[in-house]
Image (spheres, rainbow, N blue to C red):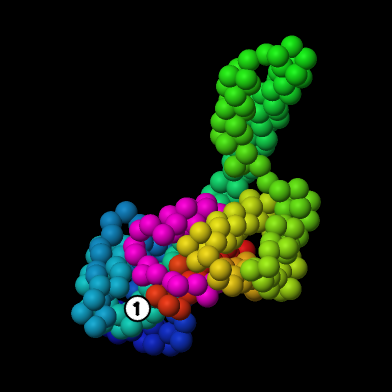
Amino acid sequence: MRERRVVEALVTWLGPEPDPRVLTSVIGSAAGATGCALTVAGERFQWGDGDAWVSFQVTYDGEAQGTLDLAPASVGPMPEVVAVLGAPLALVRLRIETEQLRRAGDSAARQLVDDRWRAAAEMEQERRGLERDLHDGAQHHLVALRMAFAIAEHSGGSVDDLLSRLDTAERVLVDTAAGVLPVALVSQGLAAALKAELANHDDVALDIDGLRRRYPAVVESAVYFVCMEAVNNAHKHASGAHITVSARDSYRGLEFAVTDDGPGFVVSATGSGLHNLTERAGAVGGTVEVSSTPGEGTTVQGFVPL
């Protein structure tokens, strides 16, 4: 009689989106229990309380959906109630797991953004350190070299000493200059930097009218150097080819490409400059793909999400 009363109460209260809190209240009240709890997808919903509990596994279509706990244990087995609860708990479980996945996805996205900007800050700090190294290190050697030339001019000093000083200055420059950004890139952005570097190259066409937005400095510098390296690769391996550099804003982020109509090549899993390009883009959360076919040119295409 008690079990039939519980089933009738459940049928009355069940809707298209069952609330586990309501279900525990309905079941507990109709059964005359002091406590009722439903555990679904790791979450427990409880009504009332009790010292001695009895637990029933709820299944649907042969798959466990959760458990029903009642107090006191003397309430006894309720197979019909458990059977009626199968489908509603399956819906509750699906809803909870969907929400858990959404929260996990949001958390992962926030972590990715945090990691990305932390890396960006670290890269910017490193760049400023390189600039200081260039100012305090290479400039010192160049000033010393200028003074040595002046002395040599007036006193006939050793050319070997000057060459040694020149080698030292060149080595310091090579070690530090790679981290310094062009003035146009820092002050005006990626579009201005590409124009300043490539506009006067007869074999390079620019398609950057769709690039109007400014991006974080670390993103613009990464894309700039990827494009420059791709252009240099084209000059080196596709001499005389026509090169097009394009970049544009999209609702997803920054898209860019460097295309040439040179001889092309067979793209392998490694090599062909791909590692350096993907490493630069990957440091800011971006991707780069190289596609090429012998006789049909080469395209380096990349994307950095917002």
Residue at 43% x, 78% y is 295
Q: Magenta-highlighted stretch: main secondary structure?
A: loop
Residue at 68% x, 46% y is 181
Residue 297's x, y, as percent? 48, 74
Residue at 68% x, 35% y is 131
Residue 105's x, y, as percent? 48, 64
What residue type is disc 1 on? Ala
The residue wearing badge 1 is: 90
Viewer-proximal residue, 137 or 40?
137
Residue at 69% x, 22% y is 145
Q: Quadrant of residue 226?
A: bottom right
Viewer-proximal residue, 121 or 127?
127
Q: Which residues are magenta?
A: 259-286
- Residue 142 appears anywhere in the view: yes
In the rendered structure, the answer to whether residue 296 lies left or right of residue 1 reads right
Residue 234's x, y, as percent? 53, 64
In the displayed structure, 73 sits above or below 180; it is below
In the displayed structure, 161 sits above or below 85; it is above
Q: Quadrant of residue 80?
A: bottom left
